[in-house]
Each structure stands twice: as structure tokens, then as C-alpha cells.
Image (spheres, grey):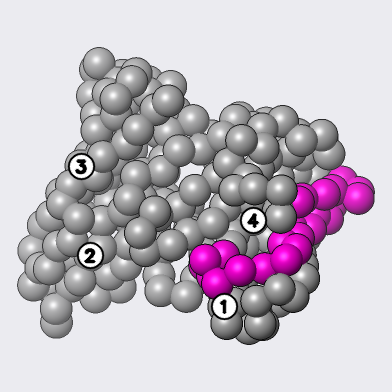
Amino acid sequence: DAGVIQSPRHEVTEMGQEVTLRCKLISGHNSLFWYRQTMMRGLELLIYFNNNVPIDDSGMPEDRFSAKMPNASFSTLKIQPSEPRDSAVYFCASSLLNQPQHFGDGTRLSIL
Amino acid sequence: SQELEQSPQSLIVQEGKNLTINCTSSKTLYGLYWYKQKYGEGLIFLMMLQKGGEEKSHEKITAKLDEKKQQSSLHITASQPSHAGIYLCGAGGGSEKLVFGKGTKLTVNP
């Protein structure tokens, strides 16, 4: 079975540009989580969805960040405009109710 | 909010040695997850513990949750270079948000 698929794996862009990260859930999973990992802060939850509905977005840093689930198997995380402090590895994870979360391989984002 | 503290932050052992990583919670744990991460890769699920006193093993890795459900340990027996990586504990889970510890970086020298 295919796992959680994230794209791109690496993204380097200049500050001020729009960045879109993509995530394909494992088929049949109904919960979707976006995380950010940095050396200083570790792994932090940004937002999560149950059945396509955002449940908790309290971890989203500011209005420059937005996440959507246009359908049950796909999600995007957008940063506009991007800033150097947004540089991090971004992970998405999916799960079934009360089951362990399965993580993608992450997107390594560098904002110059 | 729940906080998880892991110790040690890093660990260097000789191949064949046993080791233990600890995860302590500020609140009662209702679901405790152990993940392993290799550099440049995502998190790999290892084990989930839910009941006080529960213990699970997979190959040479054993995880325990104490009776009070506020502390968990991960024990590796006869470590191998393939065990190297970052081990993270997470609380919550399933369709609820996971809070993670900062991780323990394990190096196993051949």
C-alpha cells in the first residue's frame, strides 16, 4: 500500500514568494495532520482535519499560513508571503480514527 | 496543555549495548506513541501504549507505560547500527492532535 505522499521533497525560494506544499493521504484515512519540524522547536502541530473539516488550527503561526482539503484524499498547505523564518521541514500525517498516525517523508523548505 | 519531556537528549552507545530512553508527561497519558525518525525522512510508527502497566515488544525494542500513565520508557536490547536515529514519544493520537517530545538522538557505534 502507498504511504502518505508529500510533494515537493525540497523547495528553495526567495522570501515573499508563495509556497504550496502538497499531501496525499493514505487511501481510506479520514484524519489529516500538518506538522512543522525545526531544531529549536522540535515537531509542532500546525493544523488537523477530521473528515475534511478543520478541527484545530491553533498551531498555525499566522495568517500567512493556510491549509485546505479540497477532497478526502488530498491537502495543501500554503504560505503567502513566505519569510526566512518559515524555513523548516513540513510533514503531513494521516490516520484512521483512534489509530496511529502515518507520516510522509516531509518537505524541506528553505526561504532565502 | 500537555508537555512531554524526553531524556536523554542524545545517547551514544557501542553496538551490542542495551539502552533506555524515557518520556515523562505533565499529565496523565491516554495514548502514548513511540516513533523513530532517520535524518531526512519521516517518522516511522513503532508502538502505541494505552493501558497503565502495558508493555509491548517488537524485535529488540520494548516499550512500557507505567501504572500511573505518566511515564513511558523505550528499551533497546543488544543495539545495532540500524537502531540509530531520533526517537520521539507522542501523546494523544488517533484523530486527536499529537504532542511530541523533543526527541532523543541515538548513535550506535560499530
Whether labels 3 and 2 belong to a single chain: the reply is yes
Residue at left 59%, top 59%? A91
Amino acid at pointer 2:
Leu
Position above or below: B90 against B17: above
Q: Quadrant of the C terminus of chain A?
A: bottom right
Q: Residues within 10 Å of mark 4 (few under 14, many from 20)?
A: many
N-terminal of the pair, mark 3 or mark 2, is 3
Where residue A110 is drawn, which disc sits there?
1
Where residue A51 is drawn, which disc sits there?
none
Percent across and percent down for residue A29 are 75, 44
Whether labels 3 and 4 belong to a single chain: the reply is no
| Closer-to-camera residue (A66/A74) | A66
Where residue B22 is drawn, which disc sits there?
3
Tag 1 subunit: A
Q: Residues within 10 Å of mark 1 (few under 14, many from 20)?
A: some
Amino acid at pointer 3:
Asn
Span colored in magenta: A66-88
Q: Quote the CA–CA distance across marks 3 and 2.
A: 13 Å
Per the image, label 4 sits on a secondary structure element best described as strand
